[in-house]
Image (tube, helix red, strand yellow):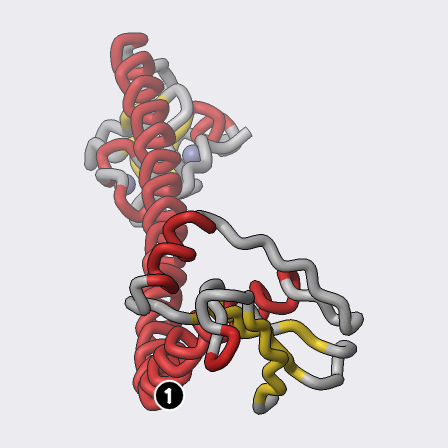
Amino acid sequence: MVGFNAKNLDCIESFYICNFCSLVLRKPVQLIDYGHRLCQSCANEQTGKLIRCSEHCEKAPRENNSDQNIDALKEVFQTINILSDGVGNLVGELKSLSTECDQLGNRLQTSIQESSRVHKSIEEQHPSIDDIKSKQEMIEQEIPSIIKKIDDMSRNSCDGTYTSRITNAKEKIAAAQSRTQPSIYSPPFYSSRTGYKMSLRLYLNGDGTAQKTHLSLFFVLMRSE
Ligand SMILES: [Zn+2]
Ligand SMILES: [Zn+2]
């Protein structure tokens, strides 16, 4: 049985290293001539009066060093191992941090590229946004006439018949008699969906020779759209 092995033998003071097996001393004994230390087992392996260390042949007391030294050595050995584990962990953490840092850097790069691509495409789309605006304005201008057409289509007859309802007849008759508004027009109506557009013109107080004696009703053929 030789000394204790440790991960970082190089860093341990020579005071704690066996001069024979070059490991951490196990139950150290101190030789007499030069004071070098060996594991007890390393010393016991040798027979004869003189004990060989790595450099000399020395007289051996063949006695245990004090137990205090052994305990202190054990403690040092444990501490060294703990520290060595700690350093190992730190190195691992440092590596993973560095990897994370690299990944973040890559992501940032990708984001910057994506952002500049989006920016460029927005700039390219800008003219077409103007086009859309002007088209929208045109459509907005057309909306009232479209609404009127739909209104006409829905309200007006498309089968050649037309039922007229005259509202406020009294006032309209008075307006016709005073000639402030001699005639009124009906809304347009159609002979069919694609047929003639027509309306009725009504003189409530008569027109021409019929004035003041008859109603005059004219059938008006209109210009279609
Ligand atoms: Zn040894
Ligand atoms: Zn020696």
Q: Position of residue 50 (x, y in %)?
A: 38, 34
Q: Quadrant of ligand 1?
A: top left
Query: From the image, which quarter does the N terminus lie in?
Result: top right
Q: Residue beneath label 1, please? A: 131
Query: Would you say 151 lies left or right of 119 here?
Result: right
Q: Position of residue 143 (x, y in %)?
A: 45, 72
- For the point 37% across and 31% down, the residue is 81
Q: Residue 210, relative to residue 27: is it above or below?
A: below
Q: Residue 12, relative to residue 154: is it above or below?
A: above
Q: Position of residue 16 (x, y in %)?
A: 28, 32
Residue 176 in sight in this render = yes
Query: Would you say 42 lies left or right of 53 here?
Result: right
- Packing grade of label 1 (10 A; few <14, some 14-19, many >=20) is few
Query: Would you say 158 lies left or right of 225 here?
Result: right
Residue 219 placement: quadrant: bottom right
Q: Position of residue 121 (x, y in %)?
A: 38, 83
- For the point 27% across and 39% down, the residue is 12
Residue 53 in sight in this render = no
- For the point 36% across and 55% down, the residue is 174
153 vs 221, nearest the viewer = 221
215 vs 185, nearest the viewer = 215
